[in-house]
């Protein structure tokens, strides 16, 4: 499992593979937030990763944040929210959609439905208590895209940066490309250049801040908006 550690001693661990990367954000007291929940077929891998992590951390999974409602990011939210009895945070406009989804297989579905909370741009989550987790609304790929800046150092991005790589441009499934570009600009300006140096996407490799700042395609698009 790939792992990054902030200077506040928050561990960020990649739980699943590139078809849908979910992350565990573990504060110094092992309070843990899950960012995304991977596609359904990766649930066993996600559970195996959590089991492995529990050998070294006494995990207290206290919250789930969904980057957006595409299946490869949110499919296991129901199962995990019930299992850990924790709230699910998502964009306010997605709360009702989640509440009315048909695939609630758990017998405790009402508990899960009551535990879905909308979070807004700039909001600081109070979970996990010892990590600083800031929500950034980054529409474009999807209207409800939420990134999470952890301890002002590392940003989990879901699919917000999708479309930046050459191989993605022809098939970029952005709902609104202009909004995507605005969000790329926002992410670069919302993060302190001296500190937030790394972006962890929902698919593929981590992206260094300097890679974004030197990405000619990104710079060209940002200058045009
Ligand atoms: Zn997506």
Image: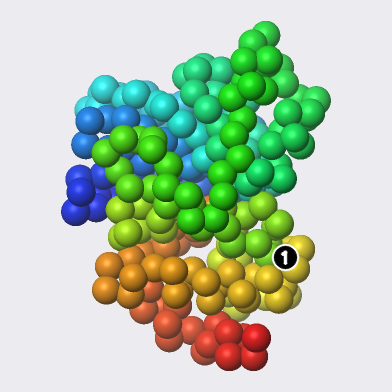
Indicate the quadrant where residue 101 lies. Answer: top right
Q: Residue at x 32, y 25 (%)?
A: 59
Query: Can the viewer see residue 41 in this picture?
Result: no
Percent of width and height locating residue 215: 48, 84
Asked if residue 154 is positioned above or below residue 195 in the image, the reply reads above
Q: In this view of the protein, which residue sits in the foreground, 99 or 119?
A: 119
Tell me the crowding category of disc 1: few under 14, some 14 to 19, or many 20 or more residues within 10 angstroms, Cα based: some
Residue 14 in the figure: left or right of residue 180: left
Q: Residue at x 72, y 45 (%)?
A: 93
Residue placed under numbered mark 1 in the picture: 174
Query: Can the viewer see residue 103 in this picture?
Result: yes
Indicate the quadrant where residue 96 lies. Answer: top right
Asked if residue 63 is positioned above or below residue 123 in the image, the reply reads above
Indicate the quadrant where residue 170 lies. Answer: bottom right
Q: Residue at x 41, y 27 (%)?
A: 62
Percent of width and height locating residue 20: 57, 46
Percent of width and height locating residue 204: 50, 59
Q: Quadrant of the C terminus?
A: bottom right
Q: In this view of the protein, which residue sits in the foreground, 17 or 212?
A: 212
Scheme of image coloration: rainbow
């Amino acid at each position: 499992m790939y792992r990054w550690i902030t200077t506040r001693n928050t561990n960020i661990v990649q739980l699943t593979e590139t078809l849908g990367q979910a992350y565990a954000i573990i504060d110094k007291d092992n309070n843990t937030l899950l960012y995304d929940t991977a596609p359904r077929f990766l649930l066993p891998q996600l559970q195996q990763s959590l089991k492995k992590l529990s050998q070294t951390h006494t995990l207290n999974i206290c919250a789930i944040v969904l980057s957006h409602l595409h299946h490869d990011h949110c499919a296991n939210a129901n199962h995990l929210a019930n299992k850990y009895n924790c709230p699910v945070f998502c964009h306010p406009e997605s709360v009702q959609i989640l509440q009315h989804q048909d695939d609630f297989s758990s017998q405790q579905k009402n508990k899960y439905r009551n535990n879905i909370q909308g979070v807004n741009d700039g909001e600081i989550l109070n979970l996990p208590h010892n990590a600083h987790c800031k929500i950034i609304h980054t529409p474009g790929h999807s209207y409800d895209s939420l990134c999470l800046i952890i301890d002002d150092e590392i940003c989990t991005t879901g699919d917000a940066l999708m479309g930046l790589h050459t191989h993605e441009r022809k098939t970029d499934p952005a709902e609104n490309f202009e909004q995507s570009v605005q969000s790329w600009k926002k992410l670069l300006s919302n993060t302190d250049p001296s500190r937030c140096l790394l972006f962890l996407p929902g698919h593929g490799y981590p992206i260094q801040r300097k890679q974004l700042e030197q990405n000619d395609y990104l710079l060209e698009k940002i200058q045009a908006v």
